[in-house]
Amino acid sequence: MKNKIIFSFSCAMLCAFSGLSQDVIELPMTIKNGSVLGVQFGGVAPYDSSPDDPWRVTHLYAKGVPTVWSDVKVGDIDLDIYQTVYQNYLQGNMPLEFYKKLQQTWVWPDTLALSKCPIKSQVAFAFGKDVSGKTMMIIDANNNLDFSDDVAFEPIELGDGNYFGKDLLYMKHSIEISYERLFNGEIVQRKVPMLVGYVTEHNMFASAFCNML
């Protein structure tokens, strides 16, 4: 199949450069969950409870955390940190000074690629200990700020550095979550599989996305 694709592409290029007429060649593509380059993880941490935390304005407040849990901590995972910052600034939640500081620190994208209307660019999570003392987690998969219609799970352990490039692990334990993004000037609904696990050697949670379009 690979040789056929290369041959077809070569023929198309030859026709283009020789000025000959050519038919349109269409190659079917199918997107499947998984990553050719390997799953890459990012840290996941609960909210800072300090009243001086400048990120407090971006916090999500979801209800429905299991009442039998103890030592509960909540937070969110950002699917587009630029969008989150931008929309909070436009809503007057974020001070101009802090917004400008982030723009200077980060490689900031063209704001035309960001939505001026607030969209769902984050997903809430919570974790705590159940009645047996086991650490459990719950993710607001449908992004309705209500955990009561989501299923709690025990985070898989990602230890000894083996969590990099684990495509099969990702596909088996990922949860499909909903979010929104700006596409061709319109706000569209998207879904993406996400894996959250516990990195034992660093004593922290980590998450990974794949095929996020």
Image: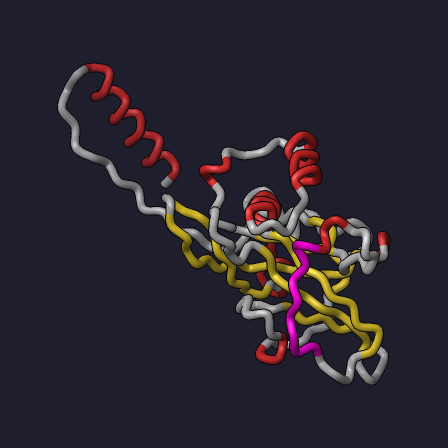
Give percent across and percent down for residue 32. 46, 54
Q: Is residue 17 left or right of residue 47?
A: left
**Could you tell me residue 44's position as x and y percent?**
73, 55
Residue occupying the far top of the picture: 18
Q: What residue lies at 60% left-to-right and 49% top-to-bottom?
A: 92
- What are the residue bounds of the magenta stretch? 57-65
Give the vertical position of 48 relative to 13 (above or below).
below
Q: Position of residue 209 (x, y in %)?
A: 59, 53
Quick one: 2 or 110, which is closer to the camera?
Answer: 110
Residue at (82%, 84%) from the top-left corner?
A: 131
**In which quadrant of the rendered image does the N terminus lie?**
top left
Residue, far left: 21
| Near-viewer residue (190 or 118) | 118
Which secondary structure class fits the magenta region best? loop
Residue at 15% from the left image edge and 20% from the top image edge: 20
Foreground of the two, 86 or 38: 86
Q: Quadrant of residue 185?
A: top left
- Image quarter of residue 127: bottom right
Q: Is residue 58 magenta?
A: yes
Q: Is residue 195 magenta?
A: no
The reply, left or right, for residue 76 in relation to residue 80 is right
Residue 77's place in the image compared with 175, above or below, is above
